Image: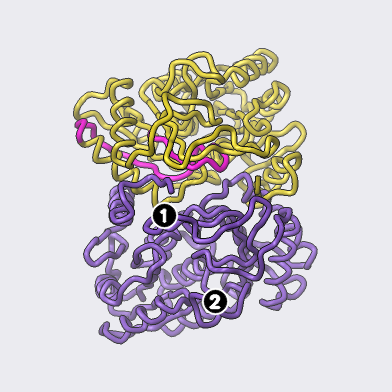
Chain colours: A purple, B yellow
Amino acid sequence: MKKLMNSPDTLLTESLRGFSAAHSGLVTVRLDPMFVTRADAPRKGKVALVSGGGSGHEPMHAGFVGMGMLDAACPGQVFTSPTPDQIVAAIEAVDGGAGVLLIVKNYAGDVMNFEMAAEIAEGAVETVLTNDDVAVEASTHSQGRRGVAATVIVEKIVGAAAERGDDLAALKALGEAVNAGSGTMGVALTSCTVPAVGRPTFDLAEDEMEMGIGIHGEPGRRRVAMMTADAIAKEIVGAVVEDVKLAKGEEVLLLVNGMGGTPLLELYGLYDAALRTCGDHGVAVARSLVGNYCTSLDMAGASITLTRLDGEKAALWDAPVHTAAMRW
Amino acid sequence: MKKLMNSPDTLLTESLRGFSAAHSGLVTVRLDPMFVTRADAPRKGKVALVSGGGSGHEPMHAGFVGMGMLDAACPGQVFTSPTPDQIVAAIEAVDGGAGVLLIVKNYAGDVMNFEMAAEIAEGAVETVLTNDDVAVEASTHSQGRRGVAATVIVEKIVGAAAERGDDLAALKALGEAVNAGSGTMGVALTSCTVPAVGRPTFDLAEDEMEMGIGIHGEPGRRRVAMMTADAIAKEIVGAVVEDVKLAKGEEVLLLVNGMGGTPLLELYGLYDAALRTCGDHGVAVARSLVGNYCTSLDMAGASITLTRLDGEKAALWDAPVHTAAMRW
């Protein structure tokens, strides 16, 4: 295993220290317990959004802390849930008196620890669970579907609504609606390598890929021979359109998300294929995002997400955001 | 070789088509000859900035087309210079009557083709050559030093000055000053794989890295045993500080740039190491950038750039920019 690091034991702390220095003024990073908040937290009278999960998915979630998105993020060790004390400390640091909404990807460890934190923390705390991965109905890491790249879209849209002053109940309902209107599926061309493990999580032959991969390297639907970008887009977009029950003429956000080891040249090519496939289904792509947002360490591969943009969702997507990884 | 594509022959066109669709309203993409311009080009009375080079370094350069940065970018095939007719067409499309400044990385093919285009094109055309790579004095691809990641910084700072109305001579002088005040060196942990070739450009053992790598996989200073992030930062920052003759107390921009296959978790860790090393040299890091900006396809690795921020350079760096890959 070769990684740009001093040791697996110090990588996360050093990375967060670097993140803190590179984005000082925008975020405040605490190392014990570990969490990242907006530099201007707490925001009085605003519902605070808190997310988190295992590290290794950067820029998710710390890269989405800032105006118009998250108030705090709690990074666990690589692919390991943050602990309840981290989450409680983050909640307390950003609670502005209007309640706290937790945005949690549906993995057993995350669900348990965020739930525990919600019970311990004082004040009103609600939770939105994301489970947009249509690949498998249950996995080695979760009961029910996994939460993956649509989490970024939930955080952006709900973040915009929180910024304009929506209350806790409305934000919870909005987050659940965005999640319900979203579907994602991914492919892996290579495995990721967890720093502390030092060898690839799984093996793929030189002519194979994993269709429906999870963001921790969990198995997907099946191991298949390498497919073209068009065939990958066709299978994924087809599965998502069916799952989300997108009707002809409906508007969507199309996210082509890199897993960390795939260059932009390929991601934009896959986006082109996904866009054409959406056209074949009569689905109108009204907003787009292409890049590395919900990654799996150094895995080569990508996921495709469609999110239904009904109601105010497009306007909330367009609303200003100022974070390390998303800004407009 | 596994890549998200339909075929090596169509990858670039499909990727540009995807880029065009994902950023419609911001850029206009022409496919024959191939170039990308600001959607609002030409801007009357403004000096137009045109860059380009082989593809495979995304987001450079098309990702930097937009307000406050480039007016046009000409992508060649992967690791292949754009042709003079592409460059001439781009120049003519963006020339707003105040002249055109070409920003060219110092590679033999690019230098020759941009020179030829400058001769063919009508109107005032000047050139800034970037050659910030301190690793080697000459390479397999260039006479003299290679132009690498500081090109991004030249494009941003000169782009801001062009936006406020500086004239052609002033912009050329500014670009040359930014380049002269910049130094970069990179490391590769893995080779890139050129799609049309289908196999890695070079081989690296599981415990080796290449110090001083070029962005096309050209050899660097030496093949060495894998080093820690601290040791890498120490060697690179030391080489750059010496080369650029940075004195104690001087302010710099610190760019930690991913080569395409290295995740943000590691890049921020390397940034932390580079920042500490700058401190050891008494150099003050006043601005920072961390991410994939000047890549080498799917290569794992990173480069570190320091740019002296004297005069107005920090203010020009801070000026608004609205492109696909850089926005504030």
Is disc 2 placed on a helix, strand or loop?
loop
Quarter of the image with the N terminus of chain B is top right
Q: Are marks 2 and 1 on the same chain?
A: yes
Question: In the drawing, does residue B263 fall left or right of residue A43?
Answer: right
Q: CA distance from mark 2 to mark 1?
A: 23 Å
Question: Which residue lies at the image location 56% right of the left edge and 37% below the top edge?
Answer: B57
Q: The residue under label 1 is which amino acid type?
A: Gly
Q: Which mark is residue A198?
A: 1
Can residue A67 be seen here? no
Is disc 1 placed on a helix, strand or loop?
loop
Magenta range is B280-304
Residue A27 to residue B86: above or below: below
Magenta stretch encompasses residue B321: no
Residue A222, image x and y in percent?
A: 66, 68
Q: The residue under label 2 is which amino acid type?
A: Ser
Q: Which mark is residue A139?
A: 2
